[in-house]
Amino acid sequence: MKFPEIKPYTVSGLNRKIKNILETELFSVWVEGEISNLRTPFSGHSYFTLKDEASQLKAVLFKGQRAFVPFDLEDGQQVLAKGRVTVYEPRGDYQFIVDYVEPKGYGALQKAFEQLKEKLSREGLFDEGRKRPIPFLPGKIGIVTSSTGAAIRDILQILERRFPGFQALIAPVKVQGEGAAAEIAAAIRDLNAHGEADVLIVGRGGGSLEDLWAFNEEVVARAIFESRIPVISAVGHEIDFTIADFTADLRAPTPSAAAELVVPDKDGLAQTISSHRDGLVLAIRHIMEAYRESLENIKGNRIFREPKEIFYEPRQRLDYLALELERNALQLVEAQKGRFANLSRSLELLSPRQRLRALRDRIADFSKAVMEKTGRVIRDKHGMLEKEASRLDALSPLAVLSRGFSLCRAPDKKIIRESGQVEIGDPVSLLLHKGELLCRVEGKKK
């Protein structure tokens, strides 16, 4: 019996076969699951696991596709992911290549909106303390919006109605679709560089969240934040809120409302000015009338009829003050005379002559006492010196020599006390009471 020839697959071949089948059959599928074990290494690719209660699936979102996912992936998120199933041949692992992902039950755009709003809020872009007031009457108004939309027409019509003759700088941009956010941000920066606008209106008419999305982009928020010119955000309808609204110095619920806010009504302003002018004229008339009445009252004063009377009272006061000054001067002189007499008596008692005489007597007594005590001390010390000299003389070797003794010394001045210290022929010296003999040893006896 002959068996059929076996043609086995290689491992690589089988993996390649499985890969082709999976990529053909499961080229584009949606998978629902929870993200876990998310990691994004230096390459920028995101690796994670999609899991449910019973199973799990390895997945990867490459860096190029991440740019189209408008929110950050997080562990624990329930998502819907679109992609294809393939095999990683070197390991024989199958995995899910993700092309797009969105949160389950929560729109991806809304998720991205909330994440960016939280991020920019932490950075301080929404702080009320940094927002600037809108000029009351701007000289030129910069407008960043579509040149063909209803928003620009509404803004210009309302500005012309409220303040005819206004000046506007229009920066036409795309307000939705790819590249719209970059154009809006560039227009804001260009108007800042131009430097003539006093306020900017940035906005567009209403639409869906997707239509308004350019005003939720980070690049637009940062351009508004960096603008030196105050910015009014006017995007969509009153119920629509965008990131641009939170960043701007003032939010207008609609583009038309922005035009209402940016300039006052010229006729109303003129009426207000006229009213204030009339009130000011009336107030000035009242003040002038009050001054006129005050002047009439002053003109009727007695001083203006008899102007010399104004000097009578000051003259009397001057006379009184002169008399008082003379009386005080005499009292002061008498007081000084008495004080001088007292000082003279005190000075006589404290005369230097009397003090010097007493001091001279005290010095003489002290000198006498010192001389007497010094004499006694000298006599006592002289007696003690003589006594100590006698004791020293009695102990001196010279006294022994005076009685006929001599002192024998070697050339090095050492005293020779026994004959064994020298040899026959050695030189020695004999110290006498008076003088010294130089000798040589001729013989020795013990």
Image (cartoon, grey):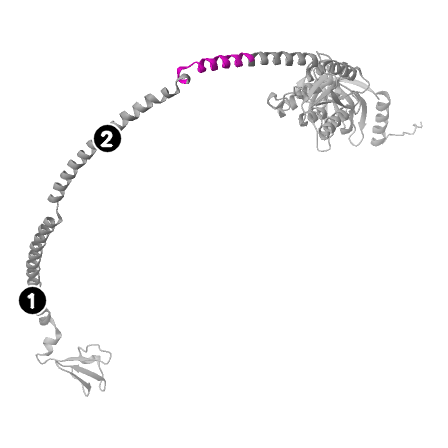
The reply to whether the magenta stretch includes residue 292 is yes
User: Which residue carries the number 2 mark?
Assistant: 326
Decide whether the magenta segment is chiefly helix, strand or loop: helix
Please give the range of residues in magenta.
Answer: 285-303
Residue found farthest to the bottom: 442
Measured as percent of width and height from the top left, residue 244 is found at: 70, 20
Near-viewer residue (299 or 232): 299
What quarter of the picture does the N terminus occupy? top right
User: Which residue carries the number 1 mark?
Assistant: 387
Amino acid carrying label 2: it is Glu
Query: Would you say residue 102 is visible in this rendering?
Result: no
Measured as percent of width and height from the top left, residue 16 is found at: 85, 29
Distance in Å between CA atoms under marks 1 and 2: 91 Å
Q: Judging from the image, what secondary structure is the residue with disc 2 in?
A: helix
The reply to whether the magenta stretch includes residue 145 is no
- Residue found 13% across the figure and 49% down from its top: 352
- Residue found 78% across the figure and 22% down from its top: 100
Q: Judging from the image, what secondary structure is the residue with disc 1 in?
A: helix
Residue found farthest to the right: 2
In the displayed structure, 195 sits above or below 292; it is: below
Measured as percent of width and height from the top left, residue 76 is found at: 67, 19
